[in-house]
Amino acid sequence: MNDLSATDRCVKCGLCLPHCPTFALTGNEADSPRGRISLMQALGEQEVLWSDGLFRHLDQCLHCGACEAMCPSGVPFGRLMDEARVVIEPRRQRSLLQRLLRRTGLGIVASPAGLGITGAVLGFYRKSGLHALTNRLPGLPATVRRLNRLLPASHATGHSAHANTPAPEEKRGSVNLFRGCAGSVLDQQTLQATTRLLQKLGYRVNVPAAHPCCGALHRHNAAPDTAQRLAQTNLEHFSGNDDPVLVTASACTAQLQAYANLYAGKAATAFAARVSDIMHFLATAGLADLHFMAPQQKVAVYLPCTHRNVLGQQQDVMQVLQCLPGTAPRLINPDGGCCGAAGAYLLSQPELSDRLARRVAARILESGAEIILTTNIGCAIQLQAALQAHSATIEVLHPVVLLERLLPAPHSPSTKGT
């Protein structure tokens, strides 16, 4: 039986309400953390009226962690939402097509082979010109146009492997790089830039072959058994050494670090302790040995919910970016605010997802930024699509991509502060 007893820790104070993105959109108490806690309590007491409304209010939760980060009672809202979705899953009335799409989607991201095939297909679709052509075709359904916008045009696609090549000057030892499912298919440029940057810092970068998804999508979508299987596989793939495991997507970092709480055993605890977001690693390892050029474009930062609310490492991102001379990147969302990506949410809840994305896009356009930096692949995809809808030519990059881009070429003189 799934344990929802921790809902009793909620005192219904309402301090979470102003921080909940969905409550801000709908104004419906049932779309607030407090309202969802009440629904979970009814589930736990088996006194719930099964209805479309129940599913909708629980499904519309973004899992952004904003309520949990500020809750004075320490209610573990994220864990409770995962438990609640497992409870309600058997009661869902999905069509055959919906069941097929769900099973296929979760199956692909759980399979390195499936990701490889998907990456190859999407790479061909983009490079062949079909991606750009589809954007110009008249009469296409709005859903098709939206999905086409969500496929990054500028990010390298495919499932290419990184060579485990020693850095030119291996001064600092070795690290492991976790690719992730979405990153390996849609954001090779971040993985490649991370590898090159770490090598220039003196690290040997090891990428275990064919390791799977972190399991976050499955954990948050009522498939805990699959999430646990993926976790066990990752523990095995990264058991060959005791080096740090570096992650370029904040959502994956949060999930991998959560292994210590989700799964019993010393192996899970030891692995979680080795996991570090790349920005935290760079902030602690230091970039003093590298001299960066000044960016020629106005730079701003959008901080993902997982980086702010779960990892609690907002300061690391801004600290690392201080190494760029002549620039002080503006934080687009200093008071929080979700872009609506939230894993599979951008596909399962398109209306709310797009409304949230438009809010963030408006802030970005108002800022005058020419480059937006964000530390989660889902947020990058969401923001790029929202900006594309405004015909805005603003790049959305991981900070590591910009850092590596601003390193002088080997033949160029590198003068600190220039």
Image: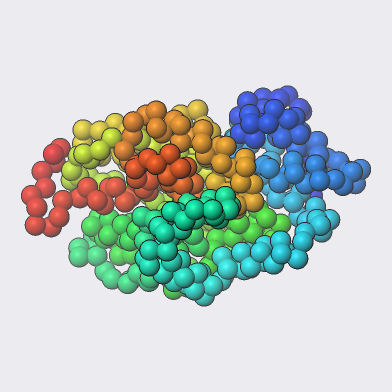
Residue 207 figure quarter: bottom left
Q: Residue furthest front?
A: 138
Image coordinates for residue 9, horizontal then vertical, percent: 76, 34
- Is residue 95 shown left or right of residue 327? right
Most foreground residue, 310 or 134: 134
Most foreground residue, 86 or 350: 350
- Above or below residue 360? Residue 100 is below
Image coordinates for residue 60, horizontal then vertical, percent: 68, 43
Residue 22 figure quarter: top right
Image coordinates for residue 294, horizontal then vertical, percent: 19, 39
- Is residue 18 shown left or right of residue 159? right
Say if residue 178 shows up in the picture.
no
Q: Residue furthest right?
A: 47
Most foreground residue, 353 or 276: 353
- Is residue 344 shown left or right of residue 395? right
Say if residue 90 shows up in the picture.
yes
- Above or below residue 235? Residue 89 is above
> Can you say which quadrant of the picture contains the C terminus?
top left
Give the colouring mode of the picture: rainbow
Residue 319 figure quarter: top left
> Can you say which quadrant of the picture contains the N terminus?
bottom right
Image coordinates for residue 264, horizontal then vertical, percent: 66, 60
Please state the total of marks drawn on the protein image: 0
At 33% from the left and 31% from the top, the residue drawn is: 368
At 46% from the left and 47% from the top, the residue drawn is: 385
- Above or below residue 26? Residue 104 is below
At 71% from the left and 61% from the top, the residue drawn is: 98
At 35% from the left and 42% from the top, the residue drawn is: 394
